[in-house]
Image (cartoon, helix red, strand yellow):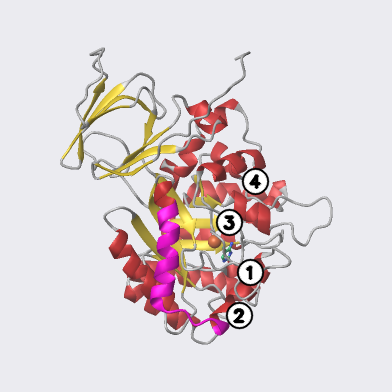
Amino acid sequence: MILKNAKLYGQDGRWDIHIEVGTIQTIKPAADTGQSSNNNDVIDLNGKIVLPPYVEPHIHLDYVLTAGTPRWSQSGSVFEGIEIWSERKQLINESKQDIKDRALKAIKMQLQHGIQHVRTHVDVGDPELKGLKALLEVKEEIKPWLDLQIVAFPQEGLYTKPDAEELLVKALEMGADVVGGIPHYELTREDGVRSVIRALELANKYDKLVDIHCDEIDDDQSRYLEVLAGEALKLGMGDRVTASHTTAMASYSNAYTYKLFQTLKKAGIHFVALPKANLHLQGRFDSHPVRRGLTRVKEMLAEGINVSFGLDSIMDPWYPLGNGDLMSVVDVGLHACHMTDFNHIVKALDLITTNGAKALGLKGEYGVKEGNQANLIVIDADDEYEAIRTQAPVLYSIRNGEVIVETKPVETTMNVSIF
Ligand code: 17E
Ligand code: FE2
């Protein structure tokens, strides 16, 4: 297959991409033949942007499409979400197949939106570990089209129930890729600290990555991030560690944040911000002025700290909306983080491509370059600024050299003579 006249994201010029046996063979300056080919194996992109597939670094696929069962959230808070999920587990006895069906519906939405790499958290608080078993099977079945990483996530805490720690360990032994945690939900400050240290220990013992739901609360005293980053720094494992949410950072004083940033920079841990989810979930205990409750994305990026964007939810007890689309997360995130200046706009797609790939530990295999597996997407825009302004849809998603998703752009007819 040849993709003719591609614009490569972040680069000038027009390029021809030759793909054979699932691999990107060559990327050369476009040969100006002046005529279009009728060869089926040639797609003329006419300058549309080619980039590596979108990366969803944070979603809960075991929760998707459950909003309203057994009840809708009244407060919209993180804590009511946790309560509803706990009630649901007791009231609704889903089979493993039911969970797989829901997860696959969400994955279909993600594929349609150009995503080929996903990290999902999975609740490992259920003694049967049904969600984990479902997602481990989905991971294998979906592999030809999408790479799935699984975080063993103790949703209701590691030290709130006697068997939680044992279940987390079992989940790691069964094949979860990443150790999770939720220190701000533990009963005491000390338990929160202990849960973070334990997650790092387990990651070392079982050779896993770490991704902690860290400080997802509007409490300026919630400071588990310093524990996570400090311990990761001392253990020299920052590159294997991700802090998700970290919304309390929006409430920290600037003086404390300055000191914290010194540790974050040295530790080299990754961050995932969830702008749509946390704009919805945070600020729920405020009267006006209502805080946005988003972590300090712009400030961390300016310090060279790796930050990516994720969606978090598709219709679950925490968040009632969501369709898998990360472009809309970028749109909301740029607004919410005051990143609507030119320089941030033209680099914004980093947040859902390379930055997420780094958090997931994808190395040289990720990226549109010669010798790599031919995994890439084409979006309906010919420059980076317009891609964001117009929320450019994904026209093609190509995996291993095959077009796995194709979307025809909508066509609008104007019957207005002045134009
Ligand atoms: N669980 C949690 O603790 N926080 C969230 N935002 C979601 C699940 C979606
Ligand atoms: Fe989450």
187 is higher (above) or lower (below) than 210: below
Q: State if disc 3 and disc 4 touch (CB < 8 Å).
A: no
Q: Position of residue 140 (x, y in %)?
A: 28, 64
Neighbour tally class for label 1: few under 14, some 14-19, many 20 plus, Cα within 10 Å: many
Find residue 87 and name its label: 2
Q: State if disc 2 and disc 4 touch (CB < 8 Å).
A: no
- Kindly tell me whether mark 3's CB lies below 8 Å from ligand 2: yes
89 is higher (above) or lower (below) than 340: below
Query: Which dot, 4 or 1, sits closer to the camera?
Result: 1
Neighbour tally class for label 4: few under 14, some 14-19, many 20 plus, Cα within 10 Å: few
Q: State if disc 1 and disc 3 touch (CB < 8 Å).
A: no
Q: Determine the residue positioned at 46% across, 59% down.
A: 232
The residue lying furthest to the right in this view is 288
Q: Is residue 14 left or right of residue 390?
A: left
Quarter in which the C terminus is drawn: top right
Q: Is residue 174 left or right of residue 389?
A: left
| Label 4 or label 3, whichever comes before in sequence order | 3
Q: Which residue is mark 3?
A: 245
| Label 3 or label 1, whichever comes before in sequence order | 1
Q: Which residue is mark 4?
A: 258
Q: Which residue is mark 1?
A: 81
Q: Quadrant of ligand 2?
A: bottom right
What stretch of residues is rendered in magenta?
90-109
Query: What's under tag 3, amino acid-wise?
Result: His
Query: Which dot, 2 or 3, sits closer to the camera?
Result: 2
